[in-house]
Image: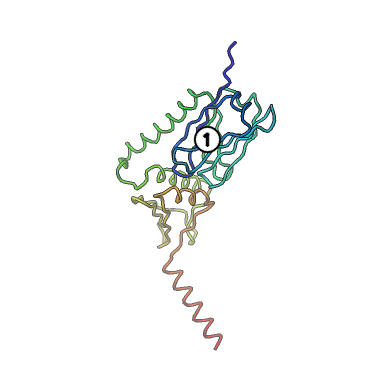
Amino acid sequence: MIINTGTTFAYKCSSCGTFQFNNISLFDLAIKKEIHFYCRCKGSSLVINRENPASYRITIPCIGCGLSHSYLLSAKEFIAQEIRVYNCPKTGMQQCFMGSDQAVRRRIDNLEKEFDDLITMFGYDNYFSNTQVMFDSLNIIHDIAERGNLFCECGNNDIELLLLSDKIYLRCNKCPGNKVIYASSNEHLKDNSLKKQILLLDEEHSSDIKVTEQLLIKRDGK
């Protein structure tokens, strides 16, 4: 029986947002105690440390929350050929895939095909400043809404969503409450991934209230 001692990692770079593929075998780790795999943009790296002869620690930079997450794997898990998916524990975003080279590349191809199909269906390929960031941000907003954490200060959760080239405009269907979610860079995507809830505000009305409060304070102070 032939045992494949190699595995492929594909992680989404936290700097440029593209998938970086790297292959490594147990023989590589037997020689080096620590290995860094840098993205082509040099903005991030996946690190593998040999804890002992039977376990390895993988540290993955996360585009979802901007931090790095560590996972401890046994030698057996390391050479397993089935696909393993690592999600950001804070946002749930898929950040890394591990397994046989063929399985990992097929999984990424399927993800990118789904994304391309969405772009074609909606005709947004030349519209958005950053199409990938826009769709990832839309997914984040959808997840927040599914958890019941998207609402207006008036108590309404009937929210209309408008897509602009570089931002997402949310507005309440019962009052002037609104919220702008920027979605044109990976920095915006990091910020959006950290959102737990989205509250729409009537900024003009809120400003009037603040001015009134300030006048009352001054009047009481006289």
Assign the N terminus to one quadrant of the image.
Answer: top right
Report how many numbered discs are placed on residues in the image: 1
The residue shown at (52%, 35%) is 37
The residue shown at (39%, 51%) is 161
User: Which residue is at the front of the view, 47 or 90?
Assistant: 47
Which class describes the residues within 10 Å of circle 1: few (<14), some (14-19), or many (20+)?
some
Q: Which residue is mark 1?
A: 37
Q: Position of residue 208 (x, y in %)?
A: 44, 73
Q: Position of residue 155 (x, y in %)?
A: 50, 59
Assign the C terminus to one quadrant of the image.
Answer: bottom right
User: Which residue is at the front of the view, 37 or 104?
Assistant: 37
Image quarter of residue 81: top right
The residue shown at (46%, 62%) is 201
Looking at the rendered structure, the kind of residue marked 1 is Phe
Name the residue furthest top: 1
- 133 up-or-down from 28: above or below: below
Name the residue furthest bottom: 222
- 201 up-or-down from 187: above or below: below
Q: Position of residue 33 (x, y in %)?
A: 63, 32
In this rendering, position of residue 78 left or right of residue 96: right
Scheme of colours in the image: rainbow
User: Does dot 1 land on a helix, a strand or a loop?
Assistant: strand
